[in-house]
Amino acid sequence: MSSVDTLNIIQGDVKKRIDRWLARYPVDQKQSAVIPSLRIVQEVNGGHLTKEIMDQVAQYLEMTPISVYEVATFYSNFEHQPVGRHKICLCTNISCMLRGSDELLDYLKTKLDVDVGQVTEDGKFSIKKVECLGACVNAPMMQIDKTFYENLTEQRLDEILDSLE
Ligand code: FES
């Protein structure tokens, strides 16, 4: 998002949203809001975090920067490189693998002409391999943005990607 001031991201609506989370915790426990705060600034920054943004979160929550980096690099839903407008998270864990996720991943990479971790030329999609998302019963599956898509086939993948703006 080009309109985001990444040197001062915690202001206006972003600040209000983080403050709503902070209000849930004791004033001396601001670090409790680190995950939702990172989620908010990542979303506002177009889907990924930078060191300067994490540093601002650390300062705002009165944490050491390293403590914020530890959280932001531990959870796989935080990104440290640019992502597409739609982040395709394809599960390649055991149940999905046994039901063809490796072949679907190859299909996806060829179809979009990008590798895992890359963004398509039009900025629309990026691909990420993820561990089990708990929908094994309908493997293979993927998550795009906030939606789970299950029982995937190549045809179903085509339909889903075509349906996204
Ligand atoms: S192994 Fe893919 S959802 Fe569980």
Image (tube, rainbow, N blue to C red):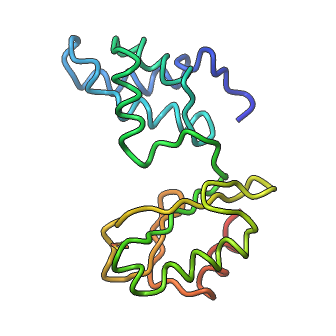
Q: Where in the figure is residue 6, as x and y percent of width and height?
A: 63, 22
Q: Quadrant of residue 7?
A: top right
* Apparent side of residue 2 relative to residue 59 in the rendered image (left or right): right
Q: Residue at the spot x=51%, y=83% of the render?
A: 152
- Front in this rendered view, residue 27 or 133: 133
* Apparent side of residue 70 relative to residue 55 in the rendered image (left or right): left
- Front in this rendered view, residue 105 or 77: 105
* Apparent side of residue 152 relative to residue 116 in the rendered image (left or right): left
Q: Quadrant of the N terminus?
A: top right
Q: Residue at the spot x=32%, y=77% of the render?
A: 136
Q: Residue at the spot x=71%, y=63% of the render?
A: 114
In this view, 17 is above or below 117: above
Q: Quadrant of residue 132?
A: bottom left
In this view, 123 is above or below 97: above
Q: Quadrant of residue 36?
A: top left
* Apparent side of residue 144 relative to residue 136 in the rendered image (left or right): right
Q: Where in the figure is residue 142, as x and y percent of width and height?
A: 48, 70
Extreme residue in the right direction: 121
Q: Quadrant of the C terminus?
A: bottom right
Q: Residue at the spot x=63%, y=88% of the render?
A: 155
Q: Quadrant of ligand 1?
A: bottom left
Q: Where in the figure is residue 57, as x and y percent of width and height?
A: 44, 20
Q: Where in the figure is residue 96, as x and y percent of width and height?
A: 40, 79
Count of all numbered marks drawn on residues in the image: 0
In this view, 46 is above or below 54: below
- Front in this rendered view, residue 64 or 25: 64
In this view, 91 is above or below 139: above
